[in-house]
Amino acid sequence: MDAIAATNWQDRAARLQFRTQAFIDGAYVPAASGKSFDNISPRDGKVLTQVAECDAEDVNRAVSAARRTFESGVWRDQHPRARKAVLLKLARLMEEHADELALLETLDMGKPIRDSRSIDIPLSIRCVQYYAEAIDKLYDQVGPSGPDAMSLILREPLGVIGVVVPWNFPLMMAVWKVAPALATGNSVVLKPAEQSPLTAIRLGELAVEAGVPPGVLNVVPGFGETAGQAIGRHMDVDMLAFTGSTEVGKYFMRYSGESNLKRVSLECGGKTPHIIMPDAADLDKAAANAAGGIFFNQGEVCNAGSRLLVHESIKDEFLEKVIHHSRRWTPGDPLDPTTNMGAMVDARQHERVLSYIGKGKAEGASLRLGGSAARADTGGYYIEPTLFDGVDSSMTIAREEIFGPVLSTLTFKTTEEAFKIANDTIYGLASAIWTRDISTAMKAARTIKAGSVWINCFDAGDITTPFGGFKQSGFGRDKSLHALEKYTDLKSVWIDLS
Ligand code: NAD
């Protein structure tokens, strides 16, 4: 038995301590208003704890701590080797507290403990390590200015970075932004989603323990309309890095325009096409990926393969295989290490997904699997893996992001038609194609407007590959060295040598 399976997570959950206050200027503090909100666990619908409800006043305090530390140079002017050592220590502390962080994630947002312990937390640690390692390996440039001058092209940190993130991979979405922002010498104000603030709150404390100077990383839990908007409109925030829905991404563009023109980077929604060509080498493997690509993390994945595009000649055979693999995905107690599907993050999301299933049926799609709530006796927010056949591009379930375990199957006759359907969406986050034909694969890579194209695999990649969207999936890239660009800007220095 592996270590995850051997652990009694229910026992450990019962003994878990929660940090629930804002983390500002290196210390836990209550919200200035004294208010807090219920943090409900989607596992059983019960109140887990109460969390400080930050608003504009707390954001002001956090931004002023971030500004003070940035201008003092206490972090950005440290030797790159020293900053690297601090962030590597943060990664080590996260590793030491990996069980605790995984439990917080699972209790807070309902994902299986097996996933939080073997995917979310390890990938978050690797992300911090990666940007730590980059710090003392980046060079600035010397321009081709000729013999009478020397030009230097320097990259400088921007200052105070606001980070606003969603609840589906709470810690991972946070560190995808916090780690490169800190690596480049900025100070940060992080607002986690109100559904899942616990790991972000703990991250602030671990960062200070690792040696990040107090005030460089601040965490303000609270609601979007209050704390999130206050960061978006703050006159002293230089850049806003957001992951979340396209709708809220648009708000941040507006906040920026109506305040100080802060730079904005947006990682928004998706409606990923997953294309199965009849010449795919291994249809069974493709079918397992089609199921995993929508049911992993309860379908609450921005790049979930929610539109399955199958060539009409193999549709019936292929769908049988997908249904076979889908039956392996079963909602269960997120704290049970054998569970592979947990709960929807909250009652609202549960309702939202069920209403999309209702729309699918009403608009004439044929329900082949699932379609109902599950485990209602637990008080938690579970939904069966759900599969629709006979979907066409005009149906709501093919157009809107459901963000739940609902797969829509569409068919096509020609490769061109497959690409046309793939691109028939406002989104452009990711795409996948299974084929043995190299030119079909490369044409897909060229033709599909999406930030990621997976060929004969799904949701593959690692911290070295940029991730982000085209079209209304947003702009700016997380992960890889390219992510560092958005937290810095170029400064030209021209030295006259004549
Ligand atoms: P959301 O947009 O509702 O919320 C995201 C964050 O924005 C939260 O912290 C929330 O409090 C805040 N917010 C909400 N309303 C706000 C407002 N009016 N002003 C300022 N801030 C506000 O998204 P969600 O429901 O938390 O997450 C699901 C969405 O996130 C999906 O659309 C999904 O595709 C997207 N997502 C994208 C990626 C990616 O990398 N592209 C990754 C994960 C999730």
Image (cartoon, helix red, strand yellow):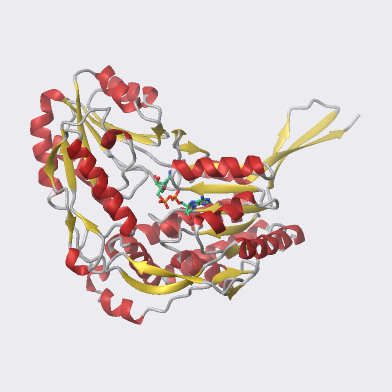
User: Where is 259 relative to 37, above or below?
Assistant: above
Task: Choose between 39 and 307: the one closer to the eye.
Answer: 39
Q: Is residue 94 shown left or right of residue 116?
A: right
Task: Choose between 190 and 213: the one closer to the eye.
Answer: 190
Task: Choose between 432 and 193: the one closer to the eye.
Answer: 193
- On the image, the x and y values in percent for residue 82 come to 64, 62
- Which residue is the extreme one toward the bottom? 15
Residue at x 66% of width, y 65% of height:
61
Residue at x 26% of width, y 31% of height:
395
Q: Quarter of the image containing the C terminus?
A: top right
- Which residue is the extreme one toward the right? 498
Residue at x 70% of width, y 53% of height:
236
Q: Is residue 208 shown left or right of residue 351?
A: right
User: Where is 205 relative to 276, above or below?
Assistant: below
- On the image, the x and y values in percent for residue 407 come to 22, 41
Q: Is residue 349 shown left or right of residue 193?
A: left
Task: Choose between 301 and 247: the one closer to the eye.
Answer: 247
Query: Which of the 4 quarters of the picture holds residue 102?
Result: bottom left
Q: Is residue 412 shown left or right of residue 16?
A: left
- On the image, the x and y values in percent for residue 18 come to 43, 76
Residue at x 48% of width, y 75% of height:
19
Q: Quarter of the image containing the N terminus?
A: bottom left
- On the image, the x and y values in percent for residue 418 come to 26, 23
Residue 139 visible in the snapshot: no
Q: How many marks?
A: 0
Residue 66 visible in the snapshot: yes
Query: Which of the 4 quarters of the picture holds residue 226?
Result: bottom right
User: Where is 337 relative to 162, above or below?
Assistant: below
